[in-house]
Image: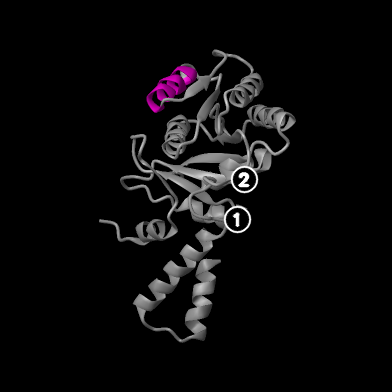
C-alpha cells in the first residue's frame, strides 16, 4: 500500500529527485506506524485500573520472560508497584526464571509450581495484586505455537478468568515478537489477535542486524501497534517505540 501511494504521488507531482522520493517514503512509513501510538504506552492508564493487567503472549523462544522483566523494571522505575504472575506452568524452569528475574527487579512473583493450571495462577495473581495494592500485574504465559489449537484455547481460558474478576481486564494483551522473525510473524500475529485480541507488540531482540520489518505488515494488516522495543539483555534495554528512529534504522544501508 505504501509503495503504491508513493508511486502515485511521484507520478502526480512529477518528482524526479531520488532523495525527495526517499524522504516521502520515510514520512509515509512514520505516519503509518504512528497511528494508535501516544507517547509512553499506558503510564497514565495505569492510574485508572488497580491493578492494571497486562497479559504477555507469544511463541516459544522470542524472549517473552526477559521482556516481562524489562517491563516490570520500567514500571517500577516510574514509581509503580508491580506483581508478576507465573502462568507459564508448561516449560521446565519457566517459573524459576521468572522468580530470579523478579528478584533482580525487586517485585513479587505469584506462582503455583510446574504443571499447575495457568488459569488458577492468573486468578491468584490478580487477587494478590488487589490485596497488596499493586498498580500493575504482568502475567507470563507459556510460549505456544500459533498453530496448536489446544494451547491457544488455554489462552482464551486465562482471558476469561481475568474478565470474570474484572470485566475490563486484561487491559493490554502484548504479543512478544522476535525482530528477526520473517513473514511467518504475520501468521503468528493474526492467530494471537483472533484468540485474545492482542492490543500491542513488544519487539524483542532489536539489536545487531535485526531490523524488524515484519511489523510494518502487521501494523498495516491487523492495526496492532508496536509499543516497546528490547535492544539488549539488560533490564534497562527497553524503550517505548520511536517511529522515526525505527524507520531510519529500517531504511539505513547495510554495511
As drawn, is 166 to the left or to the right of 242?
right
Give coordinates of residue 64: x percent, y percent: 47, 33
Q: Give the range drawn in magenta.
A: 94-105
The mark found on residue 190 in the picture is: 2
Give coordinates of residue 78: x percent, y percent: 44, 40
Q: Is mark 2 in CB contact (under 8 Å) with mark 1?
A: yes
- Counting residues from the start of the chain, the first of labels 2 and 1 encountered is 2
Give coordinates of residue 55: x percent, y percent: 58, 34
**SS type, badge 1:** helix
- Can the viewer see residue 182 in this picture? no
As drawn, is 227 to the left or to the right of 124?
left
**Front in this rendered view, residue 75 or 181:** 75
Establish if 97 lies above or below 57: above
Q: Mark 1 points at which residue?
A: 221
- The quarter in which the N terminus is drawn is bottom right
Specify the quadrant of the image occupied by residue 125. Answer: top right
Residue sitting at x 46%, y 25%: 107
Residue sitting at x 42%, y 67%: 26
- Can the viewer see residue 1 in this picture? yes
- Whether the magenta-drawn stretch holds residue 210 is answered as no
As drawn, is 38 to the left or to the right of 164?
left
Establish if 170 lies above or below 23: above
Specify the quadrant of the image occupied by residue 90. Answer: top right
Specify the quadrant of the image occupied by residue 128. Answer: top right
Amino acid at each position: 500500500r505504501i509503495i503504491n501511494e508513493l508511486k502515485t504521488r511521484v507520478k502526480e507531482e512529477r518528482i524526479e529527485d531520488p532523495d525527495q522520493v526517499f524522504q516521502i517514503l520515510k514520512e509515509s512509513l512514520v505516519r503509518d506506524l504512528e497511528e494508535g501510538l501516544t507517547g509512553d504506552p499506558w503510564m497514565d492508564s495505569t492510574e485508572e485500573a488497580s491493578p492494571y493487567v497486562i497479559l504477555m503472549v507469544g511463541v516459544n523462544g522470542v524472549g517473552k520472560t526477559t521482556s516481562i522483566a524489562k517491563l516490570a523494571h520500567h514500571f517500577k522505575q516510574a514509581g509503580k508497584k508491580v506483581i508478576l504472575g507465573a502462568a507459564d506452568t508448561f516449560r521446565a524452569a519457566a517459573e524459576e526464571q521468572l522468580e530470579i528475574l523478579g528478584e533482580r527487579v525487586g517485585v513479587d512473583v505469584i506462582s503455583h509450581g510446574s504443571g499447575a493450571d495457568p488459569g488458577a495462577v492468573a486468578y491468584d495473581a490478580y487477587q494478590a495484586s488487589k490485596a497488596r495494592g499493586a498498580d500493575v500485574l504482568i502475567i507470563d504465559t507459556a510460549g505456544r505455537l500459533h498453530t496448536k489449537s489446544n494451547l491457544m484455547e488455554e489462552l482464551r481460558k486465562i482471558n476469561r478468568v481475568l474478565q470474570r474478576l474484572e470485566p475490563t481486564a486484561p487491559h493490554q494483551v502484548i504479543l512478544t515478537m522476535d525482530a528477526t522473525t520473517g513473514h511467518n510473524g504475520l501468521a503468528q500475529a493474526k492467530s494471537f489477535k483472533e484468540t485474545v485480541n492482542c492490543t500491542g507488540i513488544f519487539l524483542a531482540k532489536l539489536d545487531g542486524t535485526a531490523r524488524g520489518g515484519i511489523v510494518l505488515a502487521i501494523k498495516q494488516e491487523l492495526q496492532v501497534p508496536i509499543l516497546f522495543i528490547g535492544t539488549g539483555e539488560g533490564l534497562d534495554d527497553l524503550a517505548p517505540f520511536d517511529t522515526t528512529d525505527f524507520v531510519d534504522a529500517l531504511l539505513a544501508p547495510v554495511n
